[in-house]
Image (cartoon, rainbow, N blue to C red):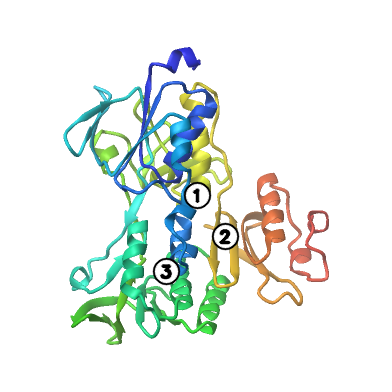
């Protein structure tokens, strides 16, 4: 699509997090000369979300240090921000969206970057609990900060032992709170990593004074004055001045479903990010796409996926022939530990663990299905992450015996 073809057209983007903001700026790079309108119900100038449970929560940094782009950048690129505005309906036939004030906005191209919202479990008493919050937005963090300040000696109960729950636990401990993590499964991170990684992070948190309680199914919450009592099905009880709920997310697909778009575990898209309806694209956490490398359909919650899909969608909207074929990667920061993950480990049948000699908290877990490397989890080990990425992308086989042998250097040439 040439500039002459789109200079009178309008691209509307619903959602102003990593996916939506990156799409808007990449549209200009790809040659879109028409209007770009970016809508989001959050009134804040778009910001980075990963630091919310980490640096932002545990520090005095203002939100301005975590903005995705400066306010001036949007002006310079002629991107119109419509913040604090909720989209209530999409009409694909008329190519208009309806806003929460019943006004309408027409579009030529529409992109859904609607993301997800916290899953709030149906626990009796949860809605009436004192100082009980999810952690998904900057407003959630501000509520948590206000409720926990000063944190010294206060009891914080975190429901959910996934990455958000564990990162929040580390941040709360840094602030001086007494922290307990309640996990329903047999181990933390049970759905996303191998037992060796679960064991490592359990020990890491316990060594830092956090209580990790597994097989804890929260059955009720009782409010007592300004505090709460979290009750579990096994009869155990935990007092809480603050409760953080981190048990997962619900994908925001309602707009897409009502508009007749194909939805299955997210908004279904093709390799160019186009939905089942012409001129409507979707990107980021809300999407369900086919990954060619693993030959399966996936929905990913990661900055990498949001940013890379935004680049592909921008090029596709501007007429460039391009497809999405990326190896997923993720990260997590807890205390002095940086975990870098690459690939998708689902379906693995063997894990090779390599502890680097004399390096303390520095090791890696390599996930294989047969002889094929699926994924690598690298703890304080950027080298393993980089090498793992290289082997996953190339499909070259790794000698597992050499990988496990600490006498063999961690180099691509020595692992083949």
Of the image marks 1 and 3, the number of the one nearer the N terminus: 3
First reached walking from the N terminus: tag 1 or tag 2: 1
What residue do we see at 64% from left, 57% from top?
370
* Disc number lying in front (1 or 2): 1
Q: Can the viewer see residue 271 in this picture?
A: no
Residue 138 visible somewhere in the drawing: yes
Q: Position of residue 361 (x, y in %)?
A: 65, 74
The residue that mark 2 highlights is 348
> Residue 314: percent from the left, percent from the top?
49, 30
Against 373, residue 335 (above or below) is: below
The crowd level at tag 3 (other Cα within 10 Å; few <14, some 14-19, many 20+) is many
Count of residue discs: 3
Q: What element carries label 1?
A: helix
Q: Residue at x 50, y 21 (%)?
A: 319
* Vertical order, 385 against 261 (above or below): below
- Nearer to me, 99 or 175: 175
- Residue in the image at 16% along x and 34% along y: 102
Q: In this view, does 110 lie to the left or right of 316?
A: left
């Amino acid at each position: 699509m040439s500039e002459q073809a789109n200079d009178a057209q309008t691209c509307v983007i619903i959602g102003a997090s990593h996916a939506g903001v990156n799409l808007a700026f990449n549209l200009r790079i790809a040659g879109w000369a028409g209007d770009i309108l970016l809508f989001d119900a959050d009134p804040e100038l778009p910001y980075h979300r990963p630091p919310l449970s980490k640096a932002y929560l545990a520090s005095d940094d203002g939100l301005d240090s975590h903005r995705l782009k400066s306010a001036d950048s949007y002006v310079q690129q002629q991107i119109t921000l419509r913040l604090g505005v909720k989209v209530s309906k999409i009409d694909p036939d008329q190519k208009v969206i309806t806003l929460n004030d019943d006004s309408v906005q027409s579009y030529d191209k529409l992109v859904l970057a609607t993301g997800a919202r916290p899953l709030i479990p149906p626990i009796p008493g949860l809605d009436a609990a004192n100082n009980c919050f999810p952690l998904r937005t900057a407003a959630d963090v501000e509520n948590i900060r206000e409720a926990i300040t000063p944190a010294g000696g206060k009891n914080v109960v975190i429901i959910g032992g996934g990455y958000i729950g564990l990162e929040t636990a580390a941040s709360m401990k840094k602030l001086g709170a007494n922290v307990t993590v309640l996990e329903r499964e047999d181990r933390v991170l049970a759905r996303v990593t191998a037992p060796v990684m679960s064991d490592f992070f359990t020990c890491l948190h316990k060594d830092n004074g956090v209580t990790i309680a597994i097989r804890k199914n929260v059955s009720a919450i009782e409010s007592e004055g300004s505090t709460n009592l979290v009750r579990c099905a096994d009869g155990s009880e935990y007092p809480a001045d603050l409760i953080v709920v981190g048990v997962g997310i619900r994908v925001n697909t309602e707009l897409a479903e009502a508009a007749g778009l194909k939805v299955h575990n997210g908004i279904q898209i093709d390799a160019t990010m186009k939905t089942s309806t012409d001129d409507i694209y979707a990107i980021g956490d809300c999407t369900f796409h086919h990954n060619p490398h693993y030959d399966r359909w996936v929905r990913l919650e990661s900055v990498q996926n949001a940013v890379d899909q935004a680049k592909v969608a921008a090029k596709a909207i501007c007429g460039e022939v391009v497809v999405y074929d990326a190896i997923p990667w993720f990260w997590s920061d807890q205390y002095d530990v940086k975990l870098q993950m690459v690939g998708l480990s689902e379906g693995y049948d063997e894990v090779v663990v390599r502890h680097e000699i004399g390096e303390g908290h520095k090791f890696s877990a390599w996930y294989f299905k047969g002889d094929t490397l699926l994924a690598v989890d690298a703890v304080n080990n950027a080298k393993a992450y980089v090498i793992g990425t290289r082997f996953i992308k190339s499909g070259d086989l790794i000698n597992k015996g050499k990988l496990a042998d600490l006498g063999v250097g961690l180099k691509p040439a020595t692992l083949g």
